[in-house]
Amino acid sequence: MTALAKSLPSRSAPVPDTPALLDLQGLTTGYGDIEVVQQVDMSFSRGVMTAIIGSNGAGKSTVIKAAAGLLPAWSGKILAKGEDITREAGFRRLKRGIAYVPQGRIVLPEMTVRENLELGGYMLGGDHRRLRSAIERLCALFPILGERMSQLAGNMSGGEQQMLAIARALVTSPDVVILDEPSLGLSPKYVAVVFEKLTELARGGLTIVVVEQKASMVLTVADYGYVMHTGRVAFRGLARELLADDRVKRVFLGEAPEAVAHA
Ligand SMILES: Nc1ncnc2c1ncn2[C@@H]1O[C@H](COP(=O)(O)OP(=O)(O)OP(=O)(O)O)[C@@H](O)[C@H]1O
Ligand SMILES: [Mg+2]
């Protein structure tokens, strides 16, 4: 553990008392023989929006890739509603209702908006009625997609593509959606729209786990937060408490990234 991580002990704040849909317990993982994430404990409850913030290279994306089943855990446990899913592949976790939106608003540019959404629903196994009603529901949430159904995804703006990437992950009506930097590279207008939509979804009962560089902004809309530093959780707590915490503010919410190096 680095000096900084030692100087920033984990805070224990009450987790919201709804049942956890997804739990990471002592998760350690990495790439090749390089251990990147150590002993991470996180818990995601129904209808709660959780932000994961932290410095570049802290291991945020690595943690959520492991949670989504795209990277094997080296040790520790991953539980879904209390059931051990540590060794389950990503598509099985998706079947359980754990969806993942990777970084970089990945859509299939040569396919239409409708085709992209239909692909998101392949798990529905040809249940056309359910697919149709899911797409209708998503168009109500993201009206722009309804208007652009026949347009090629590649011809949409970055913000619109991100809406599509999020909507595609929601076609199967997951319980938990895990997003990696959904605001990355978007115009300020669309950054606000993305956060607004996530808030709306959480209010509707969806469990949201969102990794973000825009730390202050995401903590403003999230309920709970984890601050990662060098592969560990340095702080955890209610988002509003993290926002008000001087140590978190100084090191992780400041404008100057060099604050981390000098802390
Ligand atoms: N595929 C990979 N192979 C090897 N090392 C990797 C790989 N992906 C990430 N890493 C390394 O793991 C560490 C954590 O990376 P990770 O992407 O999880 O960080 P992050 O917190 O998401 O950072 P950022 O804010 O820059 O997205 C970094 O040192 C990174 O270089
Ligand atoms: Mg990342």
Image (tube, rainbow, N blue to C red):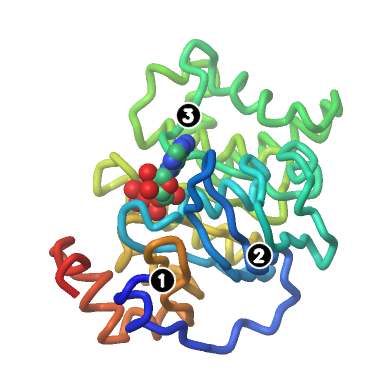
Q: Residue furthest top?
A: 110
Q: Residue at x 48, y 24 (%)?
A: 148
Per the model, the C-alpha gap separating discs 3 and 2 is: 26 Å
Amino acid type at image mark 2:
Leu
- The image shows residue 220, relative to residue 210, as above or below, that is below
Amino acid type at image mark 1:
Met
Q: Which residue is mark 1?
A: 1
Q: Nearer the viewer, mark 2 or mark 1?
A: 1
Q: At which x and y percent is residue 189? A: 27, 47
Sequence-first disc among 2 and 1: 1
Q: Which residue is mark 2?
A: 24
Q: Nearer the viewer, residue 64 or 20?
A: 64
Amino acid type at image mark 3:
Ile
Compared across the picture, whether 143 is left or right of 191 comes to: right
- Near mark 3 (Cα within 10 A), the count class, few <14, some 14-19 or many ≥20, is some
Sequence-first disc among 3 and 2: 2
Q: At which x and y percent is residue 85? A: 79, 54
